[in-house]
Amino acid sequence: MDGHGHGHTLFDTAIGVCGMAWGPAGITAVQLPEPSPEGTRQRLLCNLPGPVPEHEPPPMVQSAITELKAALRGERPADLRHLPLDMSRLTPFLQRVYERARAIPPGQTLTYGELAAEMGDRNLARAIGQAMGANPFAPVVPCHRVLAAGGQPGGFSASGGAITKWRLLEIEGYRPGGPSLFD
């Protein structure tokens, strides 16, 4: 990152006003639209340490915003795995869950139970659901690609809940009942 240090910005997308915060080590938070831009800002900043002033984004962040906007328009696959996220304030468990969720290809899904089994313990499904609900990087960490058993949406912490989750999946070309990662 460049010399801007910490900062945040709001930006318009096809689904509403989103937000992004950054620090010297990468993107520190991404926020899907809330009912108002000020609500988006508050939710973006609520778990970040210290003041995070509004700034013009440095080039890497501006590039990330451009890619996210294109993904939310459905113009290119929403594969944002290469964007540098700063997860240093998160627990090792959350870091592992979010890194694994980032590996789910656009338009595909896993269930909480499948993700738990991959991480070595089916009993982690509830904890993984809670981790997805607390995801500070949606949709860069694509928690919308993690479903409850039977292909049900499960919870979704963004404004609009499950409707927003299905909308993000639809933008990516996901069709319920379509091919699974395990076919």
Image: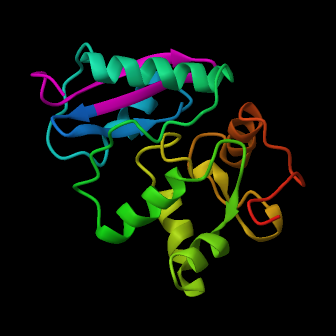
Q: How is the image coloured?
A: rainbow
Instruction: Judge whether residue 81 is colored magenta.
Output: no
What residue is rendered at 69% in x and 24% in y? 74
Residue 88 appears in the figure: yes
Instruction: Decide whether residue 8 is among the magenta residues.
Output: yes
Front residue of this view, candidates 142 and 132: 142
Quadrant in which the N terminus appears: top left
Classified by dominant secondary structure, the portion drawn in magenta counts as: strand
* Residue 85 sits above or below residue 40 on the image: below
Q: Is residue 18 left or right of residue 150?
A: left
Residue 34 percent coordinates (x, y): 53, 33
Q: Position of residue 56 (x, y in %)?
A: 25, 13
The spot of residue 88 in percent (x, y) is: 22, 55
Q: As drawn, which residue projects farthest toward the left?
A: 3
- The answer to whether one can see residue 15 in this image is no
Residue at 16% x, 31% y: name it.
6
Total marks in image? 0
Residue at 25 percent of width and 45 percent of height: 48
Q: Is residue 34 above or below residue 60?
A: below
Q: Residue at x 51, y 67 (%)?
A: 130
Quadrant of the rendered structure where residue 118 is?
bottom right
Place of residue 65 in the rendered image (x, y in percent of width and height, measured from the top left): 43, 21
Range covered by the magenta-colored residues: 1-21
Q: Is residue 149 left or right of residue 178?
A: left
